[in-house]
Amino acid sequence: MRRKALSWCAAVAAVVGLAQTASASSITLYANPAAGSIGVEGNAAPGFGSGSWQGNPVGSPAKSEFYFSPAFLGFSGPVLFSDINSISYWTNKPGTAGDPDWALYIYTKPTGTDDSAGWYKSRLTAEPYFTNTASVPANTWHEWSTSDPTNPLRFYDAPRAGYFGTYTDPTLATLQGGSYTWTNPITLAQTTHDYRNEEILFFSLQTGSGWANGFNGLVDGLSITVTNANAAREIGTVNLEAAAPVPEPASLVLLGTGLIGAGARRWRKRNDA
Ligand SMILES: [Ca+2]
């Protein structure tokens, strides 16, 4: 009897182990001023290194935007909209929850039918202030997530529905549940669309070009979890850092010594032969 119970436990553990099979990729990106990204050292989201990236408050438009393809994030194959389990990222801004912030965008690949633009089929946007989060103190890190139990990110489809978000927009789970009908809050025009089988082109973090002009908040720690074709979970995380570390003189000396050592070994070997 006891043996039977034990083997049942082992079977459950095996199933749990299978469900938790996950591959993960963790990427660190360093700010590149030439590409419009500004690095900040000494201020990072919890668990994401020592630095972060800041919104670009200068130029016209004063906009920052970064695009991550599924392949770049290390996912093993194409990612469909319905494959996304969750997306989260951290921001830290001077204002409170209702102020401009880094927004999350999902672009899907164009198919030639019902494309919203020449280079993408759908563009879904999630802005932190539409999560109905009551208060986030200024200048503190806060994680925004599609799977937040009380204040999840909500998405709008400006190209199709013709408006830029409301506090009652659908969550990721709602859009993955089937066709969704958007109702423009002003014109009351309705548009129905099903995103589930669309292939992800880019996940993106951006600041608005108009309303967020001058925004200089921080962003860090993007995490995306998907279910792959083998029903296993894959996690892609992006750590944003200020600048690539420059080797210190001491380590350069050590490197030089190492090279000399390698050269000496080769020389000795040749002489031994
Ligand atoms: Ca970081």
Image (cartoon, rainbow, N blue to C red):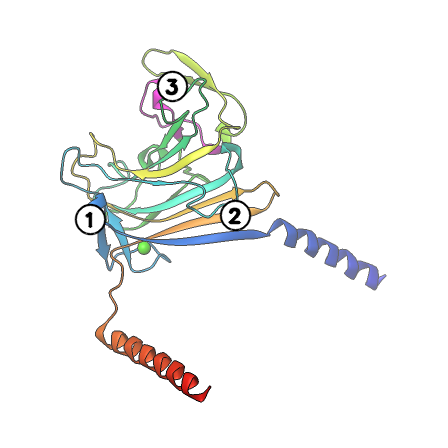
Which structural element holds mark 3?
helix
Callout 1: few (<14), some (14-19), or many (20+) C-alpha neighbours within 10 Å?
Answer: few
Nearest to N terminus: mark 2 or mark 1: 1
The residue that appears at 54% across and 28% down in the rendered structure is 177
Would you place residue 1 above or below residue 105 in this image?
A: below
| Pointers 2 and 3 in contact (C-beta within 8 Å) | no
| Range shown magenta | 155-172
Q: Is residue 160 visible?
A: yes
Q: Which mark is residue 81?
A: none
Callout 2: few (<14), some (14-19), or many (20+) C-alpha neighbours within 10 Å?
Answer: many
Which residue in the rendered view is the most extreme toward the left?
59
Give the labeled residue for mark 1: 33
Q: Position of residue 131 (x, y in %)?
A: 37, 35
Q: Amino acid at mark 2?
A: Glu
Give the labeled residue for mark 3: 160
Instruction: Give the Cα separation between the discs numbered 3 and 1.
Output: 34 Å
Q: Nearer the viewer, residue 203 or 176?
A: 203
| Pointers 2 and 1 in contact (C-beta within 8 Å) | no
Callout 3: few (<14), some (14-19), or many (20+) C-alpha neighbours within 10 Å?
Answer: some
Instruction: Locate residue 74 relative to residue 59 in the image: left or right.
Output: right
Q: Which mark is residue 234?
A: 2
User: Which dot, 3 or 1, sits closer to the camera?
Assistant: 1
Q: Amino acid at mark 1?
A: Pro
Instruction: Give the Cα separation between the discs numbered 2 and 1.
Output: 31 Å
The residue that appears at 24% across and 39% down in the rendered structure is 64
Q: Is residue 148 visible?
A: no
Question: Quarter for ligand 1?
Answer: bottom left
Q: Position of residue 42 (x, y in %)?
A: 24, 60
